[in-house]
Image (tube, rainbow, N blue to C red):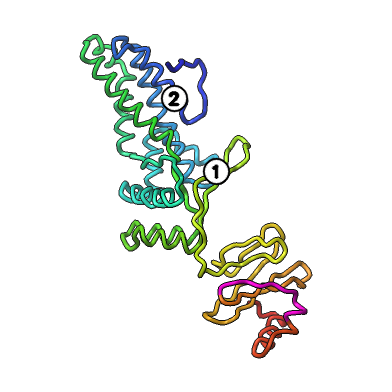
Amino acid sequence: MAQISMQHKADLAHHVRQGIAWLDQSAAGTNTSALSYAALELRFAIERLAVHYWCALLNRPIEEHDLRDIQSFRRIESRIYELAGHERKIEKHFEFMRIFLATLKVERPLHTPQIGRLSNYWHECSEMCHIGWPLASSLTEVGAAAFAKLSEIAELLKLHVDSLGWPVLQEEGLKQLRARFIAGDASSDDVLAYMRKVGVWAKETFPDGRPSRFIGEAVPLDSSARVLRCVVCRWAQLARTCSDVCLRHNLLATMVLSGGHKTKSRCESPRDQGPVIEHVDGGFETENRGALRQRLREPWRAAVRNTRTGNRW
């Protein structure tokens, strides 16, 4: 049996636990005062969950003017819709993310937030926090009905609290693919194809400072995709843009793509004397700049001269 706490806590599940603890004290609705406290805690829980979603969607440090968004539940609800879109768009976003989780074999629940339903539940809990409820609660059937409704609300909130929350995409390619998926222009097969093209893995990080860890099973990179590999530490990444960076050695590599031919990119050190990364038929070889200059044949000599005069590839 959950224990009633004399202090509020900031964690997401706290008010759900307190609501359930008061429901236990209500003896299935007989102790009606306990039902009122359960309703208050569950209303707090709905607001806390809404703030959790709002923070994720804001996707930046909270500033002082943002606090106006959480002055009332109605304002939080409106802000969520502004940031995330209408209910169908929210449903499609979570459907999109569940494809990722299933493919990565991450066995964590990801429930779609039902903002409209949460709003209805918030109003029902609020009704039990006004004087009309104590006056009507003397009727046995009223207490039993209230207990059933609050138990239903508590179960839904527990599902959402145990869920992974509200995933936010950072990569532009994923954002574009999600937009096509929501519009009906991309299917789950397109999502899987993209994952195989870029290679995807999942890592879990903890806000309390615990070491992060990999979860699920990585989706390996398609062998036909072009990959840059740092010649110093062998760290590899997909060549998606023209400015892929090795974070360990601060080497900027610029990739030139051309179908079926050798393509070169220079990994520039602070003294502009770094090694060269060369792409040969889907694989990568590395050698120092001097050796490469000796080996290159025309027309690549002219290309190297252009690079030295400032035309960056």
Q: Nearer the viewer, residue 72 or 151?
A: 151
Q: Nearer the viewer, mark 1 or mark 2?
A: 1
Q: Position of residue 50 (x, y in %)?
A: 41, 36
Image point (72%, 80%), residue name? 292
Q: Position of residue 32 (x, y in %)?
A: 31, 12
Q: Nearer the viewer, residue 126 or 291?
A: 291
Query: In the displayed structure, does residue 125 sit left or right of residue 295?
Result: left
Residue position marked by numbered label 2 in the rendering: 15
Image point (51%, 29%), residue name? 11
Looking at the image, the residue that sits furthest to the bottom is 298
Image point (45%, 47%), residue name? 105
Q: For numbered disc 1, what is the local secondary structure?
A: strand
Answer with the quarter of the image where residue 53 lies: top left
Q: How many marks?
A: 2
Above or below for 53 versus 282: above
**Which quadrant would the C terminus be assigned to in this image?**
bottom right
Image point (70%, 73%), residue name? 276
How far apart are labels 1 and 2 at the CA level? 25 Å
What segment is highlighted magenta in the picture?
282-292
Residue position marked by numbered label 1 in the rendering: 204
Please state which amino acid type lies under the numbered disc 1: Glu
Query: In the displayed structure, does residue 93 sit left or right of residue 195?
Result: left
**Which quadrant would the N terminus be assigned to in this image?**
top left
Q: Nearer the viewer, residue 114 or 277?
A: 277
Above or below for 207 versus 3: below
Please tell me which of labels 1 and 2 falls first in the chain: 2
Answer whether residue 235 is magenta in the image. no
Answer with the quarter of the image where residue 252 lies: bottom right
Q: For numbered disc 2, what is the local secondary structure?
A: helix
